[in-house]
Image (cartoon, rainbow, N blue to C red):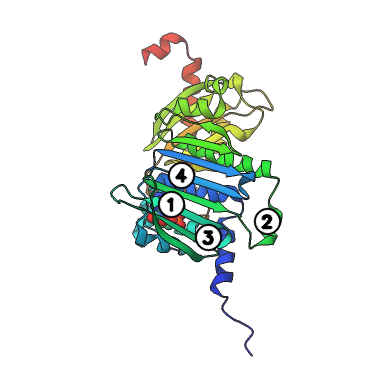
């Protein structure tokens, strides 16, 4: 008898889901990115017990057509790209069509959604990739996802979750990054019935930074705005004397997406070299706009790591932008006025 067999859909879905969803925060990340891609200007995230038992993301975006709901939960089903060439010019946060399929493989999901021009909304429920409910209902324009009991069917994964407070902190960190990357969206985070973060969504980076990190931090920043060979770097960096005790406050957003990039981090630290005390680290909220075809966001399913077609150029752009901002600040006043 043959020893090799093709895994059942249930098992292969569970394996694939593990790539995308490893903790409550990864569910919230995917749902938030979908809400942003749907054009929402108002997004509420609510979690209970670190997200383990309950996560809700409500948006006022464009909603999902009733007929599209079952498809949305299939793997590789997306409305965001359709052909190979589209991969070179991705402007949305999602495009893999894997998130909803992964979430519904490891949790119980309810969706309430309504498009602006529809008279009714739809309530759709799915559990273990199996449809439970699909019915008309009244609801506001936009989409609400409720995800309950993550990993209820994967005890091994459930065991690996950290304390509720630690899982909740991961969610809060993530909401923070998205808040900073989208100052034009009003975000609300409710944690165990308590509102923890509320942002204005007035489009101003300063107000987003203020809501997230507080007044003292917001007032310790200098402005960065510089273009180097087609790369526009703007945002804020910390005054050298107000540098931080760790690297937690280094935020880079490439084309609106929070990223981890060694090139950017190294360039930042190089720009501050000899400017800050030993044991202190620069902080920043920097937005880097590059032509989409020079960045490969396709490296990892969670898309936090990116690769640039020219890492050196990226390094230079961040370095010069920050260095320039620091030098302008230190320059005698006449020189600044001279500019
Ligand atoms: P992707 O985001 O990569 O396209 P997902 O599995 O996250 O894949 O979502 C599948 C599809 O479901 C999306 O392409 C989109 O059309 C739809 N969708 C998901 N969430 C929302 C939402 N909050 N509002 C509107 N449409 C949504
Ligand atoms: Mg998505």
Marks 3/1: CA–CA distance: 15 Å
Sequence order check, earlier mark of 2 and 3: 3
Which residue has dot 2 on it?
A: 158
Q: Identify the element where label 4 is drawn.
A: strand
Marks 4/3: CA–CA distance: 17 Å
Marks 1/4: CA–CA distance: 9 Å
Residue 211 falls left or right of residue 60: right
Instruction: Please tell me whether residue 300 is drawn above or below residue 40 in the rendered image.
Output: below
Q: Is mark 2 within 8 Å of ligand 1?
A: no
Residue placed at 65% from the left, 32% from the top?
A: 246
Which residue has dot 4 on it?
A: 58
Sequence order check, earlier mark of 3 and 1: 3
Please state the horizontal and vertical placement of residue 104, each as a whole percent of the image: 53, 60
Which residue has dot 3 on it?
A: 104
Sequence order check, earlier mark of 2 and 1: 1
Sequence order check, earlier mark of 4 and 3: 4
């Amino acid at each position: 008898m043959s020893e090799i067999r093709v895994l059942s859909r249930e098992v292969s879905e569970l394996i694939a889901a593990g790539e995308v969803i490893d903790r409550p925060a990864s569910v919230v990340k995917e749902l938030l990115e979908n809400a942003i891609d749907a054009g929402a200007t108002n997004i509420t995230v609510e979690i209970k017990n670190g997200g383990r038992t309950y996560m809700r993301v409500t948006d006022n975006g464009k909603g999902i057509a009733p007929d599209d709901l079952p498809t949305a939960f299939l793997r590789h089903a997306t409305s965001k790209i359709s052909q190979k060439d589209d991969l070179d010019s991705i402007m949305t946060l999602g495009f893999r069509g894997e998130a909803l399929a992964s979430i519904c493989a490891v949790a119980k999901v309810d969706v309430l959604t309504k498009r602006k021009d529809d008279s009714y909304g739809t309530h759709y429920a799915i559990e273990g990739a199996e449809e439970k409910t699909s019915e008309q209902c009244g609801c506001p324009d936009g989409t609400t996802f409720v995800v309950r009991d993550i990993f209820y069917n994967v005890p091994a994964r459930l065991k690996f979750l950290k304390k509720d407070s630690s899982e909740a902190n991961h969610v809060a960190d993530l909401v923070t990054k998205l808040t900073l990357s989208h100052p034009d969206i009003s975000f609300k985070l409710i944690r165990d019935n308590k509102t923890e973060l509320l942002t204005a969504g007035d489009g101003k980076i300063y107000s987003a930074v203020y809501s997230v990190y507080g007044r003292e931090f917001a007032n310790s920043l200098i402005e960065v705005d510089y273009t180097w060979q087609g790369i526009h770097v703007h945002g804020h960096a910390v005054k050298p004397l107000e540098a931080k005790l760790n690297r937690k406050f280094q935020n880079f957003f490439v084309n609106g997406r929070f990223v981890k990039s060694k090139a950017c981090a190294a360039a930042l630290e190089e720009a501050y070299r000899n400017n800050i005390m030993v044991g202190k680290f620069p902080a920043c909220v920097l937005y880097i706009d590059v032509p989409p075809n020079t960045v490969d966001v396709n490296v990892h399913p969670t898309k936090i790591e990116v690769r640039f077609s020219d890492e050196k150029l990226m390094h230079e752009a961040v370095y010069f932008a920050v260095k320039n901002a620091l030098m302008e600040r230190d320059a005698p006043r006449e020189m600044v006025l001279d500019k």
